[in-house]
């Protein structure tokens, strides 16, 4: 298992390449548009607040957080955390990221179903993800089919989580692109930069899902559930 050429060529290398390209595109787009200020001069935190105020959302706290592009919205605590590069920045890139996260708050307030599903399975995935790796390795190493199948089931939850994440992220970006112009946070011509930053960020979620899907198919094949092979 640990030196399986098929795993290296079909799963590991393509996954690393996709993740590497996606990460490079995000950093490149963010770096470029973080150097370009907006005409209106709103900071990322102000932009997020404007979008939420316009949506009638007044119970979400906007806080700064450490870490490069560690921005996120937590539905359980109604907290919108913006990284240092976004919170106080007036750049096009910062506005795009901040409005994207505000888009998640709008999703939450409007009862967007995919976000609710993702939030509901977070505890299960948080427990099952690390457990799946252990079960999969032990199942293959010890040639114990029950352990391997349990690992596949646990890892399947990770794949489902990443699949649900795609519409959640795409929808948040779509809202951000449209609303940041409608709310007067940026001018229409500045949206090009916002689009490029958010489109690049979306690729990271696509790459993660495809990589995990290939990994799941590989283990299904090793278990004899796909393609007839069984070790």
Image: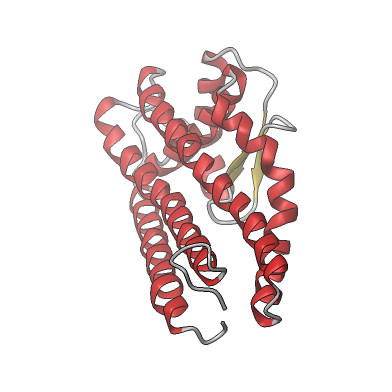
Farthest residue, direction front: 228
Query: Residue 193: where, in percent of width, then height?
Result: 31, 41
| Quarter holding residue 133 | bottom right
Q: Quadrant of the N terminus?
A: bottom right
| Quarter holding residue 56 | top right
Visible residue check, residue 90:
no
Relative to residue 199, is residue 145 drawn left or right? right
Query: Residue 166: where, in percent of width, then height?
Result: 46, 41
Residue at position x 44%, y 70% in the image: 11
Vertical placement of residue 103 versus 152, above or below: above
| Quarter holding residue 115 | top right
Farthest residue, direction left: 189
Q: Quadrant of the C terminus?
A: bottom right
Query: Residue 25: where, in percent of width, then height?
Result: 35, 58
Relative to residue 209, is residue 29 drawn left or right? left
Visible residue check, residue 172:
yes
Colouring convention used in this rendered image of the protein: secondary structure
The image shows a total of numbered marks equal to 0
Residue at position x 70%, y 20% in the image: 59
Residue at position x 71%, y 76% in the image: 138
């Amino acid at each position: 298992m640990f030196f399986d050429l098929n795993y290296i060529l079909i799963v590991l290398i393509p996954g690393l390449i996709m993740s590497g390209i996606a990460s490079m595109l995000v950093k490149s787009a963010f770096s470029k548009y973080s150097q370009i200020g907006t005409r209106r001069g709103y900071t990322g935190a102000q932009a997020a607040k404007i979008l939420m105020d316009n949506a009638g959302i007044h119970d979400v706290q906007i806080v700064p957080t450490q870490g490069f592009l560690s921005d996120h919205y937590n539905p359980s605590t109604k907290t919108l955390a913006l990284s240092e590069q976004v919170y106080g920045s007036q750049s096009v890139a910062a506005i795009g990221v901040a409005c994207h996260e505000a888009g998640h708050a709008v999703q939450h307030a409007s009862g967007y179903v995919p976000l609710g599903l993702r939030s509901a399975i977070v505890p299960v995935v948080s427990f099952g993800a690390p457990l799946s790796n252990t079960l999969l390795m032990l199942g293959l190493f010890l040639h114990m089919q029950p352990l391997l199948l349990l690992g596949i089931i646990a890892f399947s939850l990770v794949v489902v989580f990443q699949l649900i994440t795609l519409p959640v992220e795409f929808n948040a970006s779509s809202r951000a692109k449209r609303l940041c112009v409608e709310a007067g946070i940026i001018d229409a011509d500045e949206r090009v930069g916002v689009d490029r930053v958010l489109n690049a960020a979306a690729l990271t979620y696509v790459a993660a899902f495809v990589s995990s899907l290939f990994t799941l198919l590989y283990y299904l094949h090793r278990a004899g559930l796909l393609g007839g092979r069984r070790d």
